[in-house]
Image (tube, rainbow, N blue to C red):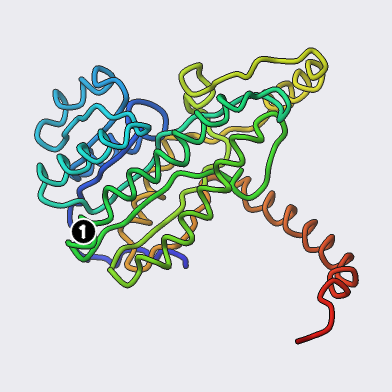
């Protein structure tokens, strides 16, 4: 659904109260400050409280900063409850915390992959499960999950990261149907490539490399360096259009590159499925 422009003279949206994970850098930081600058209130969370220390000095009572490791379910539950008690309600719960694991499928250890899922999938789930009883009691709320265009297509070398986003997409799509009767909305935010700190050491983990993949990975990273990246400072308006909409979309791409990629990806998949449909039909067996 295309957001409708606000009519001249129409009242501005009422200030919202946000709970944001991963608020110390990247999109999380940009969106936290943008929400505060428009007069919303934010419970901003990060692993290191010191990384948020400047926010109260700048925004005063509009912001509550909380230390939060999303892989610690008890800390998640306590932080969500504290934010709700502090502000009296939560309107938007934004799961942004996450990182990428760099390594081929063969290179990454099971421990590497488990740790990735603990943050990107189970950490997100912990926040959702902590927030849902509170949102249900309110009778409203909007859960935003930051996925990626890579929740629809994949790239080599970061296949495990892509796999967490595919899981993320399925989780939120099911969630949207389950919580709609309670007045709770769900939107999956799917950024393309942006010039954020996501490529920094704090947002990347590297699997132990195997020499056999060195040339392949060097070529892959060379191609990435030439990729056009969007301006993250241009994204808050899109986020606000979603949270202010009466009927927000289940999914929203950020940037101009994802839609062409997804069109091409699904065209190729459909062509393959259709070409192999006689084999699929035969596998149906006799109708019962």
Q: Residues within 10 Å of mark 1 (few under 14, many from 20)?
A: few
Image point (34%, 49%), residue name: 128
Name the one closer to the observer, 230 or 248. Answer: 248
Image point (78%, 15%), residue name: 214
The number of callouts visible is 1
Quadrant for residue 31, please give it. top left
Q: Relative to residue 184, is residue 105 drawn left or right?
A: right
Q: Position of residue 93 (x, y in %)?
A: 30, 48
Name the one closer to the observer, 260 or 4. Answer: 260
Q: Relative to residue 66, is residue 205 drawn left or right?
A: right
Q: Residue furthest bottom?
A: 288
Q: Position of residue 120 (x, y in %)?
A: 47, 37
Residue behind mark 1:
12
Quadrant for residue 109, please give it. top right
Q: Position of residue 248 (x, y in %)?
A: 39, 63
Image point (88%, 65%), residue name: 276
| Quadrant where the image shows the C terminus | bottom right
Q: Is residue 139 above or below residue 117?
A: below
Q: Residue furthest top?
A: 211
Image point (46%, 52%), residue name: 188
Q: Relative to residue 65, is residue 101 drawn left or right?
A: right
Disc 1 secondary structure class: loop
Quadrant for residue 83, please give it. top left
Name the one closer to the observer, 224 or 178. Answer: 178
């Amino acid at each position: 659904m295309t957001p409708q422009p606000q009519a001249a003279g129409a009242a501005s949206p009422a200030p919202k109260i946000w709970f944001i994970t991963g608020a110390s850098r990247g999109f999380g930081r940009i969106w936290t400050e943008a929400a505060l600058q428009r007069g919303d209130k934010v419970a901003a969370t990060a692993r290191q409280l010191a990384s948020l220390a400047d926010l109260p000095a700048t925004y005063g009572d509009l912001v509550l900063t909380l230390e939060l490791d999303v892989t610690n379910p008890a800390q998640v539950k306590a932080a969500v409850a504290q934010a709700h008690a502090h502000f009296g309600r939560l309107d938007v719960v934004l799961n942004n915390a996450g990182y990428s694991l760099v390594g081929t499928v063969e290179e990454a250890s099971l421990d590497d992959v488990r740790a990735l899922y603990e943050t990107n999938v189970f950490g997100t789930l912990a926040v959702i499960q902590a927030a849902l009883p509170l949102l249900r009691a309110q009778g409203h709320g909007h859960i935003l999950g930051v996925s990626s265009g890579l929740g629809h297509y994949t790239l080599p070398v970061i296949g495990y990261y892509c796999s967490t986003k595919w899981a993320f997409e399925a989780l939120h799509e099911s969630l949207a149907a389950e919580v709609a009767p309670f007045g709770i909305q769900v939107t999956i935010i799917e950024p393309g490539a942006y010039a954020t700190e996501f490529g920094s050491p704090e947002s990347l983990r590297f699997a132990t490399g195997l020499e056999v993949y060195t040339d392949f990975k060097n070529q892959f990273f060379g191609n990435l360096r030439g990729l056009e990246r969007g301006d993250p400072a241009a994204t808050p308006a899109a986020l606000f259009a979603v949270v202010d909409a009466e009927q927000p979309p289940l999914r929203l791409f950020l940037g101009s590159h994802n839609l062409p990629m997804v069109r091409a990806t699904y065209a190729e998949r459909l062509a393959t499925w259709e070409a192999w449909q006689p084999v699929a039909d035969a596998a149906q067996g006799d109708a019962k």
